[in-house]
Image: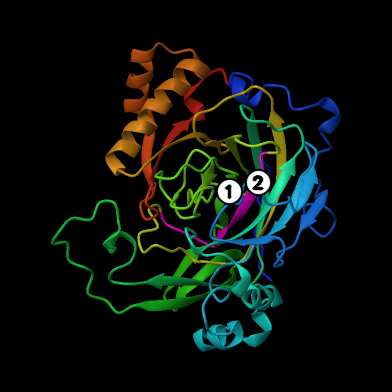
């Protein structure tokens, strides 16, 4: 089984006040996750992917948590790709038909597939999501810090789907216009093997093309506050998993790999964290509508910051601060990302607003992280090394 190991996250320095607020309690902090002799990062808890821990296409706000933890604890979370687990055909027939050997099909996929009939579908999307996890002390108005300590693949394969009317070519794409032509290609599912090649983890796209494996969770979320009429909310109390929002969700920001930290606002007691939509590799935009859809396991540490309020997801890598703008309109997502970058530079770095906008224009890269999930994500990448005092 293939796996990805990376260095631990760099936590935002005390110049960044949102990450320096006190956690829920000093006693809640536990020792840093250690690397055992096997090379596996240890965790305080495990959440397996079972019919009881998995959700199909939404983020329940009133489901009994699958795990209760203290702030500062680490959890190993198994996730299951929807590919092979949600279609009408039995997973073994479906996946072997794509070329997956029977021994590489997870029993979890078969168990979840067998549980589909009793699951509500109205207002839901297609992702399979693990959770929720209740973090003690988290309350509305707080911030949840999610440190991504490790991501590993559970199986040595993933699937990418393409269609002439999918992804950015879909008629439901927010930027679609009357008269737009679909792409003239047949619909297809592409099995992509993953594994080691010359000492590095890669996706074997074709005999002549190897793509570096860079696994991450496309979905990391807290329980949202669904309001009918907002993106993905057509049924009261049900937030479909397709569009990301202030709660995180289907952000599809490929940079949120092992060694990074995500910050989310809290809307419900316990935060109620979810993870899923594992990707073995993805380009910015995810233009076909899917990445290398792959079952992954992640190790996460959760820290509650009391009384710290942020308007939208933020993140950091060892080299950058990431500020996300989310909107149905790509132009407005870029505008929102810029506004939030300016606010960040004013509030966390002490710049005057005009200087903040100037710096954003000359030093910050704004990237289109995803454009296929109804709401679209533009991420501002602020380099850390431009600040002499961090």
Which stretch did the figure color magenta?
Answer: 271-283
What is the number of the mark on residue 220?
Answer: 1
Q: Relative to 149, is 191 above or below?
A: below
Labels 2 and 1 touching (C-beta < 8 A)? yes
| Left or right, 346 with reference to 113 | left
Q: Residue at x 37, y 14 (%)?
A: 353
What is the number of the mark on residue 54?
Answer: none
Q: Of 230 and 280, which appears nearest the observer? A: 230
Mark 2 vs mark 1, foreground winner is 2
Using a 10 Å C-alpha cutoff, classify the residue at mark 2 as few (fewer than 14 neighbours), some (14 to 19) or many (20 or more). Answer: many
Q: Quadrant of residue 332?
A: top left
- From this viewpoint, is residue 254 visible? yes
Q: Residue at x 47, y 69 (%)?
A: 210
Q: Of 122 and 210, which appears nearest the observer? A: 122
Q: Position of residue 203 (x, y in %)?
A: 52, 69
Using a 10 Å C-alpha cutoff, classify the residue at mark 1 as few (fewer than 14 neighbours), some (14 to 19) or many (20 or more). Answer: many
C-alpha distance separating marks 2 and 1: 7 Å
Q: Quadrant of residue 190?
A: bottom left
Q: Position of residue 170 (x, y in %)?
A: 29, 63
Task: Give the secondary structure at mark 1.
Answer: strand
Q: Residue at x 61, y 27 (%)?
A: 141
Q: Earlier in the sequence, mark 2 or mark 1?
A: 1
């Amino acid at each position: 089984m293939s796996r990805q190991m990376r260095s631990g996250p760099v936590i935002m320095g005390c110049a960044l006040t949102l990450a320096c607020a006190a956690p829920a309690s000093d006693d809640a902090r536990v020792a840093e996750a250690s690397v055992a002799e096997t090379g596996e990062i240890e965790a305080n808890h495990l959440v397996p992917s079972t019919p009881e821990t998995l959700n199909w296409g939404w983020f329940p706000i009133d489901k009994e948590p699958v795990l209760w933890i203290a702030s500062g604890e680490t959890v190993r979370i198994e996730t299951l790709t929807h590919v092979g687990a949600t279609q009408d055909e039995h997973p073994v027939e479906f996946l072997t038909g794509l070329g997956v050997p029977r021994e590489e099909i997870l029993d979890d996929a078969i168990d979840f597939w067998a549980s589909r009939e009793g699951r509500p579908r109205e207002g839901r999307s297609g992702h399979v999501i693990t959770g929720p996890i209740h973090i003690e002390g988290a309350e509305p108005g707080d911030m949840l810090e999610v440190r991504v300590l490790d991501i590993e693949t559970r199986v040595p394969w993933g699937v990418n789907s393409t269609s002439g009317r999918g992804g950015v070519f879909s008629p439901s794409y927010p930027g679609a216009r009357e008269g737009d032509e679909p792409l003239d290609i047949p619909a297809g599912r592409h099995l992509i093997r993953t594994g080691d090649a010359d000492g590095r983890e890669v996706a074997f796209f074709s005999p002549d093309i190897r793509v570096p494996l860079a696994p991450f969770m496309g979905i990391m979320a807290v329980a949202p506050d669904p309001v009918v009429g907002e993106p993905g909310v057509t049924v009261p109390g049900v937030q479909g998993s397709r569009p990301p929002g202030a709660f995180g969700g289907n952000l599809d920001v490929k940079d949120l790999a092992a060694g990074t930290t995500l910050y989310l606002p809290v809307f419900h007691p316990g935060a109620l964290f979810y993870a899923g939509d594992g990707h073995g590799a993805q380009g910015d935009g995810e233009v076909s509508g899917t990445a290398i859809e792959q079952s992954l396991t992640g190790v996460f540490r959760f820290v509650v910051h009391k009384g710290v309020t942020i308007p939208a997801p933020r993140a950091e890598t060892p080299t950058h601060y990431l500020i996300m703008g989310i909107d149905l309109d790509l132009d407005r997502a870029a505008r929102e990302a810029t506004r939030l970058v300016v606010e960040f530079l004013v509030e966390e770095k002490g710049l005057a607003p005009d200087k903040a906008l100037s710096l954003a224009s000359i030093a910050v890269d704004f990237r289109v992280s995803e454009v296929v999930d109804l709401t679209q994500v533009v991420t501002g990448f602020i380099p850390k090394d431009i600040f002499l005092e961090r």
